[in-house]
Image: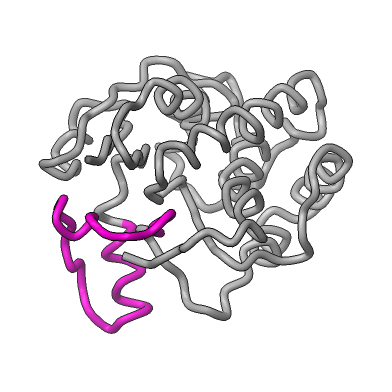
Amino acid sequence: MIDFYQIYYREEQKEELYDFATPYFNKTLTPYFENTVISELVPNCKSDYVSVCSWRLKQKRSDFRVSLYGGGERGLSLEKLTGDYDIAILTPRGPTHKPLQAAAHWHGRAWVDALDQLRTFIKIPNELKYAIYENHFIARTNIYRDYVSNCLGPCMDFMEGRDVFFMDSGYRKRKNPEDVRLYNDVSGRHDWPIAPFILERLFSIWIHDRGFKVVNI
C-alpha cells in the first residue's frame, strides 16, 4: 500500500494531478515550502510506502524522461510504483549529474554560505550519490518517518532565526514576472529564500551512505 500525496495551491493545478494521488491543498506558505507539509503528513501515514510530491510531477517527469531516455512521459500508475525497493526516485537524472555542484552554480554565494552553515549541524558529503529534486520520491514509511524525525525537523529548527538560510536565492531570475509578482503577494519577498533549495537536497544528503535500495521509476 502507498500513501501518495500531491500538493497544490491553486484550484487549476488539480487538473495536473495523477488520478491515483491524494490531493493536498496547501493553504499556508512557509519559508520551508512543501517541507512543512511533509513534516505534518508523513508521521501519520499508515501505509507501507509514502510519497509527498508537487502538482508538477507529471510535467517534471516528461521533461526528464525526454532528456534521459529519448521519449516522452511514460505515465505512472499504482502498479508501476509497486516493487521491492526502499526508495524510488520519480524524476531521475543522468548518472553524471552533480546536485551540489549544480546548486552552487545556480545560486552562487547564498548557496555556499548556507550549506557551510548547515555543515556545522549535519554531515554533508562533497557530492551526492542520488539526485532527488522537489521531494519527488517514494520511500518506505519507516524510512521517511526516520528522516522527518531525525533530519528534516531538526534541520528546519536549526535554520530558524539564522539569516543565512533566508538570503535571496536568485531563483527569481528563472521565473517569469507574473510568478514573481504572485510570490511577492503571498510572501512579501521579491525573491525566494535559499532555505527550500537546501532542503530540496536534504533527503539525498541523508540517504547518501545508508545502503538503501534505491531505484529509478
Image position of 117 (left or right of 23): right
> Residue 187: x, y in percent?
54, 20
153 or 115, nearer to the observer: 153
Q: In this view, does 124 lie above or below 144?
A: below
Q: In which quarter of the image is the N terminus?
A: top left
Residue 45 among those drawn in magenta: no
Instruction: Name the image quarter holding residue 63.
Output: bottom left
Looking at the rendering, the stretch of residues picked out in magenta corresponds to: 60-89
Give the image's coloring scheme: one colour
Res. 185 in view: no
Q: Is residue 112 above or below residue 98?
A: above
165 or 208, nearer to the observer: 208
Res. 198 in view: yes
> Residue 163: x, y in percent?
81, 27
Q: Is residue 63 above or below residue 112?
A: below
> Residue 85: x, y in percent?
38, 59
Q: Seen from this angle, which residue lies furthest right?
A: 120
Q: Seen from this angle, which residue lies furthest bottom?
A: 70
Instruction: Name the image quarter holding residue 41.
Output: top left
Which residue sits at x=31%, y=47%?
56
Q: In which quarter of the image is the C terminus?
A: bottom left
Q: How many labels does the image show?
A: 0
Image position of 22 (left or right of 103): left
Which residue sits at x=57%, y=80%?
96
Which residue sits at x=52%, y=79%?
95
Residue 74 among those drawn in magenta: yes
> Residue 13: x, y in percent?
22, 35
Q: In this view, does 161 lie above or below 50?
A: above
Image position of 114 (left or right of 29): right
204 or 146, nearer to the observer: 146
Which residue sits at x=59%, y=26%?
31
